[in-house]
Image: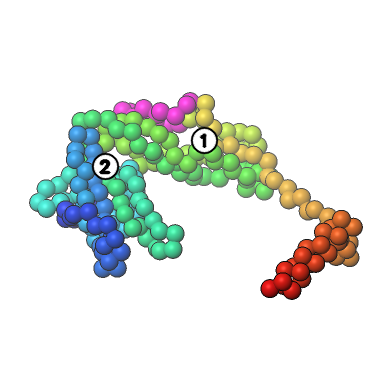
């Protein structure tokens, strides 16, 4: 997977104009590498990221040279769709790096299928250390063997590929089958009772109303 980019100068407020034109500001940095501001095609980045995620190496072509990078961070805007800035991390294929690998659940627990239980998943990613070329796409966990309530799987039980070291604590809980929560319906207060304020509340409301009237008359 490849993304074409061009070096740029820091933008400041001009980034809004760039986004309107379909461009995406980004930066690439890494170990012993000077941070370089770059410009991408926004649509091209979104297509590549759908396939690469944060664990696949991307060939970043910048002004005639190509660097191996990972997507490290994506900034978004609360009122706009899509990314507004991307951080790429340039890797050295001979040096190990730390990265978060997603956890994907597959299969179906019999207890959940019966409607007796729910799936509790405290960990949605696992921190690992490995060479960039050895980064797992994901940790796929089949929950079919977790047939009954209270059955679980912890970090120590993950199937870890050769050359990959898990950095999270072995006893951390990844997934567990827990009892289905029953919704507790609280008794509703009769409307008549709710409409009648207590004596203290009535007095406080009267004082507040009197204060407002006095303030209005003074104006």
Residue 87 visible (yes or no)? yes
Q: Where does the magenta region start and end?
A: 158-170
Question: Circles 2 and 1: CB distance less than 8 Å?
Answer: no
Residue 3 seen in this snapshot: no
Taking the image as shown, residue 172 lies to the left or right of residue 206, namely left
Observer-nearest residue: 158 or 193? 193
Q: Dot 2: within a 10 Å radius of its alpha carbon, few (fewer than 14), some, or many (20 or more) residues?
A: many
The residue positioned 43% from the left and 36% from the top of the image is 126
Q: Nearer the viewer, residue 100 or 88?
A: 88
Q: Residue furthest front?
A: 218
Taking 195 as reference, is 66 above or below it? above
Q: Residue at x 29, y 47 (%)?
A: 87
Q: Residues within 10 Å of mark 1 (few under 14, many from 20)?
A: many
Give the residue at x 27% y 30%.
96
According to the picture, the residue beneath numbered tag 2 turns out to be 89
Q: Which residue is mark 1?
A: 174
* Quadrant of the rendering where the C terminus is positioned: bottom right
User: What's the image's color scheme?
Assistant: rainbow
Residue 215 coordinates in the image, percent (x, y): 72, 68
Q: Residue furthest left?
A: 64
x, y percent for residue 47: 30, 58
> Which residue occupies 29% across, 33% down?
97
How many numbered marks appear? Answer: 2
Residue 54 lies, with reference to residue 189, above or below; the image says above
**Magenta segment includes 162:** yes
Provide residue 125's location: percent of width, then percent of height.
44, 39
Q: Secondary structure at mark 1?
A: strand
């Amino acid at each position: 997977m490849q993304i074409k980019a061009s070096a740029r100068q820091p933008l400041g407020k001009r980034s809004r104009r760039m986004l309107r034109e379909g461009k995406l500001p980004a930066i690439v940095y890494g170990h012993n590498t000077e941070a370089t501001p770059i410009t991408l095609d926004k649509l091209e980045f979104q297509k590549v990221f759908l396939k690469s995620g944060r664990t696949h190496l991307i060939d970043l072509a910048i002004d005639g040279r190509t660097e191996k990078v990972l997507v490290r961070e994506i900034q978004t805007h609360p009122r706009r769709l899509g990314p507004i800035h991307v951080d790429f991390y340039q890797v050295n294929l001979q040096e190990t790096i730390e990265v978060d690998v997603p956890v994907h659940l597959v299969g179906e627990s019999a207890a959940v299928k019966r409607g007796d239980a729910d799936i509790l998943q405290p960990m949605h990613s696992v921190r690992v250390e490995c060479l960039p070329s050895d980064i797992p796409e994901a940790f796929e966990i089949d929950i079919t063997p977790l047939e009954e309530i209270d059955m679980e799987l912890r970090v120590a039980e993950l199937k870890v590929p050769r050359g990959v070291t898990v950095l999270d604590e072995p006893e951390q809980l990844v997934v567990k089958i827990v009892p289905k929560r029953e919704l507790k319906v609280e008794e509703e207060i009769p409307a008549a009772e709710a409409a009648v304020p207590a004596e203290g509340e009535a007095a406080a409301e009267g004082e507040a109303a009197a204060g407002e009237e006095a303030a209005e008359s003074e104006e």
